[in-house]
Amino acid sequence: MDGVKKNTDDFKHIGNILCDVLNTFRLDPDLELTGLFSLWDDVVGEAVAKNARPAGFKGKILLVHVGSSVWIQELQYYKKDMIRKLNEALGKELVSDIKFKIGPV
């Protein structure tokens, strides 16, 4: 470029741009739900925490990865109680259902 100097102060890192865009579309409940990841172990207990991990959200549905089909079967019995405890820990009713799926724990 023949003697033209670009001002690098005008450039933004792509990660910052993406973060800004996502924050404009993110709903407040989504931000609150991210707190669930730090509460998970205390709320569900050590045995469950070793075999199941929150993976994401779809609206108010919590998606949880579980280590085996046996654990999925077991957690189905405790799902309502888990939802209640999670919402109590979050201070709001943000989780309406939990879907269990075999995945990385």
Image (tube, helix red, strand yellow):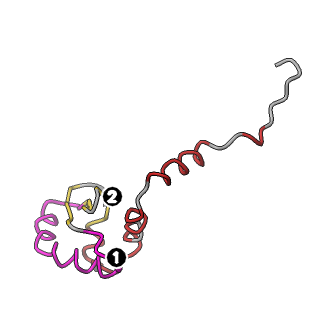
Query: What residue do we see at 31% from left, 80% from top?
Result: 43
Asked whether 92 falls inside the magenta stretch, the response is yes
Give the position of the C terminus as an image quadrant.
bottom left
Q: Nearer the viewer, residue 53 or 4?
A: 4
Q: Position of residue 24 (x, y in %)?
A: 49, 52
Residue at the limit of the structure toward the right, as seen here = 3
Q: What stretch is highlighted in magenta?
A: 66-95
Q: What is the secondary structure assignment of the residue under circle 1?
A: helix
Residue hosting label 2: 56
Task: Measure the alpha-carbon separation of dots 1 and 2.
Answer: 16 Å
User: Which of the 4 image quarters holds residue 45?
Assistant: bottom left
In the image: residue 101, left or right of residue 6: left
Q: Please name the residue shown 33% across and 58% down the image.
A: 56
Q: Is residue 72 left or right of residue 14?
A: left
Dot placed on the residue nearer the N-terminal end, 1 or 2 = 1
Task: Determine the residue positioned at 77% across, 38% down.
Answer: 8
Q: Report x, y in % for residue 89.
A: 34, 81
Q: Is residue 5 above or below residue 85?
A: above
Residue at point 57%, 46% (across, down): 15
Q: Quadrant of the N terminus?
A: top right
Amino acid found under the numbered disc labelled 2: Gly
Relative to residue 103, is residue 34 depicted above or below?
below
Whether tag 1 and tag 2 are in contact, CB under 8 A, the answer is no
* Disc 1: which residue: 41
Q: Main secondary structure of the magenta part?
A: helix
Counting every numbered tag in the picture gives 2
- Under mark 1, the amino acid is Asp
Is disc 1 surrounded by few (<14), some (14 to 19) or many (20+) residues within 10 Å? some
